Image (tube, helix red, strand yellow):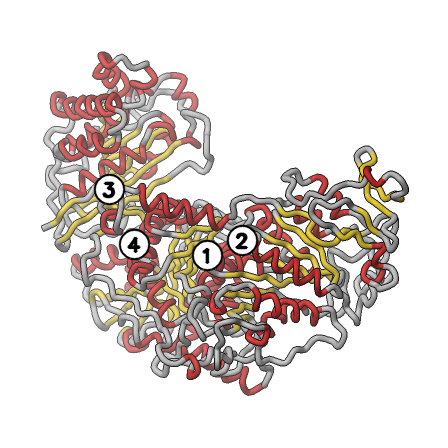
Amino acid sequence: MASSTLTTSMRKVVVRFSGDSGDGMQLTGDMFSQASGFAGNDLTTIPDFPAEIRAPQGSIGGVSSFQIQLGGTEIYTPGDTVDVLVVMNPAALAANLQFLKPGGTIIADSDEFTNKNLKKANYETNPLEDGSLDEYHLIQAPATSLTKEALKDLGLETQAMVRSKNMFTLGLVLYMFSRPLKNTIEFIERKFYKKPLLVDANKRAIEAGFNFGESTEVFGRSIVIPPANLPKGTYRNIDGNTAVAWGLLAAAESCNKKLSLCSYPITPASEILHELSSRKDMGAIVFQAEDEIAAVCAAIGAAFSGNLSITTTSGPGLSLKSEAIGLAVIAELPLVVVNVQRAGPSTGLPTKTEQSDLNQALYGRHGDAPLIVIASSSPDDCFYFAYEAARLAVEHVTPVILLSDTYLASGTSPWRLPEKGDLKPIKVPKFKGDPEKWESFMRQPEFLNRYWMSPGDKGFEHRNGGLEKKDISGNLTYEPQNHETMTHLRAEKIERISKRIPKLNVTGAQSGKLLVVGWGSTHGAINTAVTEMIEDGESEVGFTHFNYISPLPENCEEIFRAFDQILICELNNGQFANYLRSKFPQFNYEQYNKIQGQPFFTSEIKARIINILSN
Amino acid sequence: MLTDHKAKPQELTKKDFVSDQSVRWCPGCGDYMILAMMQKTFAQMGHKKENFLSVSGIGCSSRITYYLDTYGIHSIHGRAIAVATGAKLANPDLNVWVFTGDGDCMAIGGNHFIHACRRNVNLNIIVFNNKIYGMTKGQSSPTTPVGTKTKTAPEGSYEQPFNIGEVAIGSGATFFARVPDNDPKLLENVMMEAYHHEGTSVIEVLQNCVIFTDGIHEAITGKETRDDNQLRLQQGKPMIFGKELDKMIRLNGMKLEKSNVGDKSSEALIHDESELEPQMHIALANLQLPNQPVAVGIIRRVELPSYGDIVHEAIKSEMKRSEFKTLDELYRGGNTWEIS
């Protein structure tokens, strides 16, 4: 057996739980994440579900996994490769061994490595016994049988007992990382408070796993990961889609508007629709429309009526919404479009991640139809960027597209709950004076936004729609010069917002050989790569990351000018690079594009940077 | 464009709903009557002016939004009903009127139409049915009769048309009425009844296009022929019609049949717009010339909860029931930890 990659004190570690879809791996991973959060670690997680809803039990296609990277330092990605791989059956081993580091640790439920299960995973011999895992640190834990033994007095049927084996594994991993059981057990008591028998079964299974670790000393000594240096506050784990939903609720509260969400189900955006459907308790008005077009049109109707209005979707849905988003552009109505990107054109790879809807967000409308495009970059900051999308939409009375993606939607990270003063209050541009002095397309001088007057506002009755309007009065007109004026005004209105958004920051060198550039969800991998290189002594590389795409931050050009070379890293075929080329053609842009439906690995970014520096 | 709201009287009059925009329909177009009756009835509804909303799609019909001095959205082709649904859900106080045509509503917007009927959203939908695409200059629409010559069917339309009433009632509409564009009294009456109806009200107006389908409804609406060709439905009254009131509609097996009254007037069907079972209402909507009269007036009006009421009731009860009273309580509802 090879020596373990694990040491008793580590700064970062990656754990992957995997088993059959029915083995409860997501819950196990989630509970381990919470225990790690309690211990003060920073972390990022990502689930990996089978594509099919019900793949055959024990098959490789039916394997469900959950990966977490935790550490005593800031953690921005779920990790490239895995230190500890938990496998509940042979299929899980077959599907996930590729991710394990050489010398990594495997915890296997040896009870499940039966002839039948081995055959389902296409193993001819038992890998736990045939020496094929010799380069790894293998821990065989008979989770199924020991769970049954621990639960035998509870009067449960065998099947029900076996279902708790994931909790046995959790107990074992909690022991491995020196986590006290108290918080986890309290969580179980809260989660299953209506089912005391289940609480008891899960408690016993966790304790059995923990005691197995302690008494058999399979790990040698426990591993201690020190707490990370995170800002003070109250934390919880949150996934990107929930964070978007809650950010929108916070925005509605801030501007004292009702929230209308009008959406059509689509992977991977549906969870936002689900969460807000459950948030009627917060007053959310949710409309599941008959199609994507109805969804965006209903949101436009709600926006005209004075609600904070949102439609959520993914690529194919954004295509269908294009015409109506153009209506929101010319009618100058506040509308938030959340696009959770997936991979490929058409149906593509619907469950995989990509950043390839950027062009569509920027340009995907007929006519000159500019709007705001922003992108979130971690599961927890989806909260802030959803809030920000709503703030910009309301204050500038314009549609905003927020780009998230599959990777952020289903990943989790610790989220510091907002405290008083953390969120900029949202001010609704209402015309306060005599309606006689108001016209429907008059603008506030600083940012050129219209006022947002809506039904119920007495004396402000007016018509709005898709036809070109006369500057200021809003009356219909085909006057040639007026159309040009309005087109310029709509563009200028968006451009001026660059004065209101944060400037770009550069991590590492402020000038020098190479500026690495990312946008949206790739922040974690690029930031980790550059930060690690800086720690290793690299002094000529800087990193800047874009959350604001249209308009671009004011200091963009200034930052680019300070570097000899610029490397744009993105998960598509070069859309942001081409956008930057059109804005700042004076610079030379190198590209690093990955188009595999997968996020960047830190190691890939590093390799690319080293490659550029050495040429 | 903005309302002129000088000297606002307490009581609204027709004039309060006339906008400052000049009306640009072809002279003699049936749309003028719809506009006039809409302005007249708006003033009678006793609804606050600032809570009226008119929503339209694209086509000749949809221009009406600019001529009504209310809040208005002139949206995009086919989508008026979707826009209106979002608006009504957002603000239940609104009195929402959708103006659409046979192309806008039954072709490109057909999906939204059937789903609004199914959901029973509290909208009033007026379908201007001239059986042609007018604004784009004369192509076949989903209601163009077989054999009608159009730009896209120069040899005569060969597609089976929709019957708007059949589609509406078949999709679950709780209110459906049909009115000729030259019958102001019936228009006024039906518009007011639609306003009072909770749920989706569909009014099909048999509207004449003087350019492309001039006279297409003539047999139903013409002075000479209308009494013999219209079955004017009245709640609780026998279905007797004709200049001499000598014809009636009775049931023959599974079908409605026209027959002479003679001494069999007791066999005339009695109209019941409030019957929940839709079969007879669909059969009435489907009556057509030349063998049968065309039914006008309120064909179906049944009481069912409206979509908006259901949604807003659910919000109310969830707000009461929920363990979370504030967003902060929601955030703290999961497992939290402190970093100090």
Of pointers 3 and 1, the one earlier in the residue sequence: 1
Q: Is residue B293 above or below residue A5?
A: below
- Residue A46 is situated, as x and y percent measured from the top left of the image, at 32, 44
Circle nearer the N terminus (2, 1): 1
Examine the image and state in which quarter residue A576 appears. Answer: bottom left
Looking at the picture, tell me which residue is in the foreground, B229 or A577: B229
Crowding at label 3, few (<14), some or many (≥20) Cα neighbours within 10 Å? some
Amino acid on which the number 2 mark rests in the picture? Asn
Location of mark 3 (residue): B334
Host chain of mark 4: A
Between the C-alphas of marks 2 and 1, the distance is: 9 Å
Q: Which residue is mark 2?
A: B122
Residue at far bottom of view: A481
Can marks 2 and 1 be said to lie on one chain?
yes
Tell which tag, 3 or 4, sits nearer the viewer: 3
Q: Local crowd at mark 2 within 10 Å, few (<14), some, or many (≥20)?
A: many
Q: Tags 4 and 2 in contact by the CB under 8 Å rule?
A: no
**Image spot of residue A201 (x, y percent):** 24, 21
The answer to whether residue A615 is visible is no
SS for dot 2:
loop
- Classify residue A354 as left or right of residue B212: left
In this figure, which residue is indicated by the disc labeled 4? A378
Mark identifier at residue B92: 1
Marks 2,1: beta carbons within 8 A: yes
How far is disc 3 from disc 1 in space, using C-alphas?
33 Å
Chain ID of residue with mark 2: B
Q: Name the secondary structure under disc 3.
A: loop
Q: Are marks 2 and 3 in contact (CB under 8 Å)?
A: no
Circles 4 and 1: CB distance less than 8 Å? no
Please check whether the numbered discs 2 and 3 fall on a single chain: yes
**Front of the two marks 2 and 3:** 2
